[in-house]
Amino acid sequence: MIPRTLFDSEHELLRDSLRRFLENEVVPHYEEWEKAGEVDKALWKKAGEQGFLSPMVPEEYGGLGLDFLYNTIVTEEIGRMGLNGLGWQLHSDIAVPYITRLGTEEQKQKYLPGTVSGDIVTAIAMTEPGAGSDLQGVKTTARRDGDEYVINGSKTFITNGQHADLIIVVVKTDPSAGAKGTSLILVEANTPGFERGTNLDKIGMKSQDTSELFFNDVRVPVSNLLGQENQGFVHLMEELPQERLTVAVHAMSICESVLQQTVEYVKERQAFGKSVATFQNTQFVLAQLDAEITATRVFIDRCIELHVKKELSTVEASKAKLLATELQGKVVDQCLQLFGGYGYMLEYPIARAFADARVMRIYGGTSEIMKLIIGRDLLADK
């Protein structure tokens, strides 16, 4: 494997600390949480106490003021250990950065300390029953009534939907203006008129609570507007590169972990009187996957470097997500094949990795949307 140059000794101290935390506080309970469909919410506060949540939040709001490399380490270790349903990335890498970047001073003082400590779990409500990757098709409305917005509509497939204390809701403040009429509004979960649907039963990432959310004449003060009114679509586009890079980082850590698990397994597994690792087909499959993982890892690490320097473009982030998640799907499928029938048993981590992987090519923008973004840029007059 080509040596990585992103991390220094301080980063590795965090990695070691996080590994111990996950091994002690998550692994013993993870099977139980998978069956329950959600993690114990007390885990969020334990993680917050150790500095594993929202590490990029500035120190003046209770955070550590670190860069994206620390978020990367958290995502990589979650993926490496197959603990994909914790929901921390949605909180730390996607939702909280909106508040950090767009929030008023009052909003930052009110919410950011809790997002670091784990007292406030966040979600972002974009997807609707009729609007997935097409954010311009959002139907949820926020009508201005004096000093309040009145929100009506519904959202679906919302990560952290059951646990969330604070939701960033994508709404139409000017339904006649299309994308230009979109805004972001903060809604606290105890607001009258807000309701959670049932915890959705998914193929994979079962410990990750994922819900429908309903807004029935939900009234919030105008001061809950996040960013500028009718500029929500622009705000969303500005944050999508980090979201997509986070998904790519997660996918790559799973690829590497699954490959290593498979290498170890085929050395032990016997067929026709000898180790499966001695078969030429086994060696060819693993060699091809290893080569592709190595090449993609180099590209993803370069994207991380660019993002830390605030130079990662939407197009390059889209390439990262497309390549990493498509490769993840290939890796878990071909590696599961080498496990034979045991690979289909949930007691083996490869089976859970296979189930967890499928959504990675959907959320954060489907592979088809990634290709559309890349293709349009490629063919544009420059």
Image (cartoon, rainbow, N blue to C red):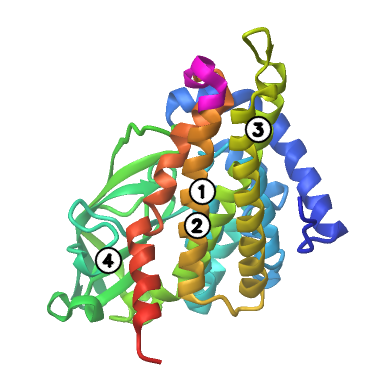
| Alpha carbon distance from label 4 to label 2 | 23 Å
Q: Nearer the viewer, mark 4 or mark 3?
A: 3
Picture residue at 60% right of the left edge, 25% below the top: 29
Magenta-tinted stretch:
337-345
| Alpha carbon distance from label 1 to label 4 | 26 Å
Which residue is disc 3 drawn over? 283
Depicted 149 relative to depicted 14: above or below: below
Q: Nearer the viewer, mark 1 or mark 4?
A: 1
Mark identifier at residue 135: 4
Lower sequence index among marks 1 and 4:
4
Picture residue at 35% right of the left edge, 85% below the top: 380
| Alpha carbon distance from label 1 to label 3 | 18 Å
Mark 1 nearby-residue class (10 Å; few <14, some 14–19, many ≥20): many
Query: 215 or 27: which is nearer to us?
Result: 27
| Alpha carbon distance from label 2 to label 3 | 23 Å
Whether tag 4 and tag 3 are in contact, CB under 8 A, the answer is no
Whether tag 1 and tag 2 are in contact, CB under 8 A, the answer is yes
Picture residue at 55% right of the left edge, 48% below the top: 251
Lower sequence index among marks 1 and 3:
3
Which residue is disc 2 drawn over? 323
Residue 145 image offset from top left, x and y in percent: 18, 75
Mark identifier at residue 234: none
Question: Is disc 1 placed on a helix, strand or loop?
Answer: helix
Mark 3 nearby-residue class (10 Å; few <14, some 14–19, many ≥20): some
Taking the image as shown, residue 110 lies to the left or right of residue 172, namely: right
Furthest toward the top, the residue is 273
Question: Is disc 3 placed on a helix, strand or loop?
Answer: helix
Q: Nearer the viewer, mark 1 or mark 3?
A: 3
| Alpha carbon distance from label 4 to label 3 | 44 Å
| Alpha carbon distance from label 1 to label 2 | 6 Å
State which quarter of the image contains the C terminus.
bottom left
Mark identifier at residue 327: 1
